[in-house]
Amino acid sequence: EVQVLESGGGLVQPGGSLRLSCAASGFTFDGFAMNWVRQAPGKGLEWVSGISSGGSTYYADSVKGRFTISRDNSKSTLYLQMNSLRAEDTAIYFCAKDLDFFPRGFDHWGQGTLVTVSS
Amino acid sequence: QSALTQPPSASGSPGQSVTFSCTGTSSDVGDYNYVSWYQQHPGKAPKLMIYEVTKRPSGVPDRFSGSRSGNTASLTVSGLQAEDEADYYCSSYAGSIKIVLFGGGTKLTVL
């Protein structure tokens, strides 16, 4: 069974940093693109970043230069390093597996991890 | 790049059909086949319902169908059931700038 499980969320002050992790299982991790999608409280979905199976990276304008996506295929784990955090980054962050290549469609999602940016 | 445009709400009675629209531009919805639709129940993770404009993942009922005309994609749900009540989001690849856009979502109410 395909599973993706996010961790690393929490409360951080504006300007601070946080690293999210997404542990994947049930599929050949290095063969699939992966993504981060966020949802602010009571709001819609916003794509944040994606990474191809080969390591090419893609970012939304709202996070470019502040967030870094990466993957460790040996650990079947996806990461999102978030720096210079702002109040508007407060959201549930979902890890989402692509059907195969980026961005064909996000077919498996985790339950999300909540990031709160507040003083 | 702006988000895709979706009507905020829609409704229908059990057994009826309802169609959601998702309007983009010639740089995203109108130019790439990577249009997807997601269903999200309150407090749950989104679920992929349609990918590549018209394709259904295994396990998604054939009551759900996708289409596109120009810069507007559509999701039709036929034979409405109570469990279809949820938020529906469209997404599209904007290939020239290599990003994924989501719509604001449509809340479906089954009367």
Image: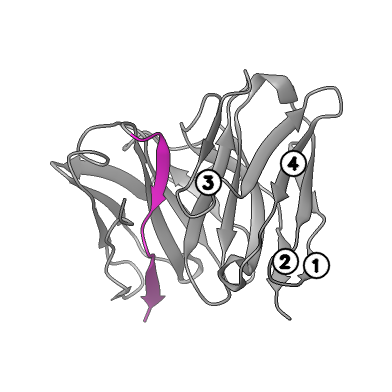
Amino acid under disc 3? Lys
- Mark 2 in CB contact with mark 4 (< 8 angstroms): no
Q: In which quarter of the image is residue B15?
A: bottom left
Is the residue A82 above or below the residue A72 in the image? below
Q: Which chain carries label 4?
A: A
Q: Is B103 one of the magenta-colored residues?
A: yes
Which residue was labeled with disc 1?
A10
Distance of mark 2 from mark 1, alpha carbons?
A: 6 Å
Residue placed under numbered mark 2 in the picture: A114
The residue tagged 3 is A64
**Residue B74 vs residue A80, the one in the foreground:** A80
Mark pair 3, 2: CA separation: 20 Å
Identity of the amino acid at label 1?
Gly
Instruction: Identify the secondary structure beneath mark 4.
Output: strand
Does label 1 lie on the same chain as label 4? yes
Mark toward the viewer: 3 or 2: 3
Vertical placement of A104 versus A22: above or below? above
Q: Position of residue B2 (x, y in %)?
A: 30, 56
Name the secondary structure under disc 3: loop
* Residue holding disc 4: A79
Give the camera-side residue of A79 and A65.
A65
